[in-house]
Amino acid sequence: MPAARSQTELLAAFDKTLALLEGDIAGLGEDEAEMTWPVGDAWSIKAIVFHRCHWIDLFFSWVAAKNAGQTPAPGVKWNELKAYNGALLSEAAKLSWAEVYAMFEAKQTALRAWIAAQDGAWLYATGHYPWMNKWTLGRWAESAGPAHFRSARKGIRKILKENAS
């Protein structure tokens, strides 16, 4: 799916991908949320959703700091992303599915509200912050929202399919 080029396109992509993801996870019980890939991967549905919450928080922290985002988090390099994301597994394990799902609802609602509240021209202009590179804030918000929702959905659907056998 091509990247959104306006606030209107971004909100449409947000709503569409969120509705699809919500369709996959709404109504899951604790046992279903704990399901993982049958072979070789410890990522559960709950961990995948928790991961998306975390990255929405990172986006907001980068915008608030106005100069962060050069790395995913202080002391972490982009080439260490796999280990960084893996560490989120232990954090997700401490929470119930109900807590993670409520957290996701709050985070995605906050991100959508933030996107909607921005001036569309400003959202799609470059150079506001040093960490933005050639991406606009709209593109960074898309990465934290709809793009992450799409990738979450792929993993979740795979888990649900492979565990249904």
Image: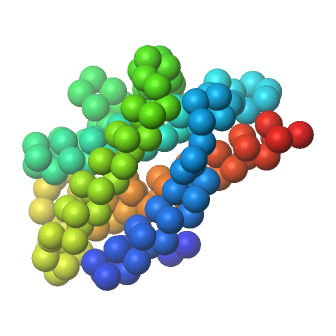
Q: Residue at x 57, y 47 (%)?
A: 27
Looking at the picture, tell me which residue is in the foreground, 118 or 131.
Answer: 118
- Residue 44 seen in render: no
Q: Residue at x 64, y 28 (%)?
A: 31
Q: Is residue 135 left or right of residue 158?
A: left
Would you identify the image quadrant in which residue 142 lies?
Answer: bottom left
> Picture coordinates of residue 96 (x, y %)?
46, 25
Looking at the picture, tell me which residue is in the foreground, 77 or 37.
Answer: 37
Q: Residue at x 29, y 63 (%)?
A: 112
Q: Decide: is 141 above or below 37.
A: below
* Count of numbered tags: 0
Q: Decide: is 86 above or below 117.
A: above
Would you identify the image quadrant in which residue 116 lies?
Answer: bottom left
For the N terminus, the image quarter is bottom right
> Picture coordinates of residue 137 (x, y %)?
24, 63
Q: Residue at x 53, y 38 (%)?
A: 48
> Picture coordinates of residue 126 (x, y %)?
20, 69
Q: Which colour scheme is used?
A: rainbow
- Residue 56 seen in render: yes
Q: In this view, does 130 lie to the left or right of 41?
A: left
Furthest toward the right, the residue is 165
> Picture coordinates of residue 161 (x, y %)?
79, 46
For the C terminus, the image quarter is top right
Would you identify the image quadrant in which residue 3 lies?
Answer: bottom left
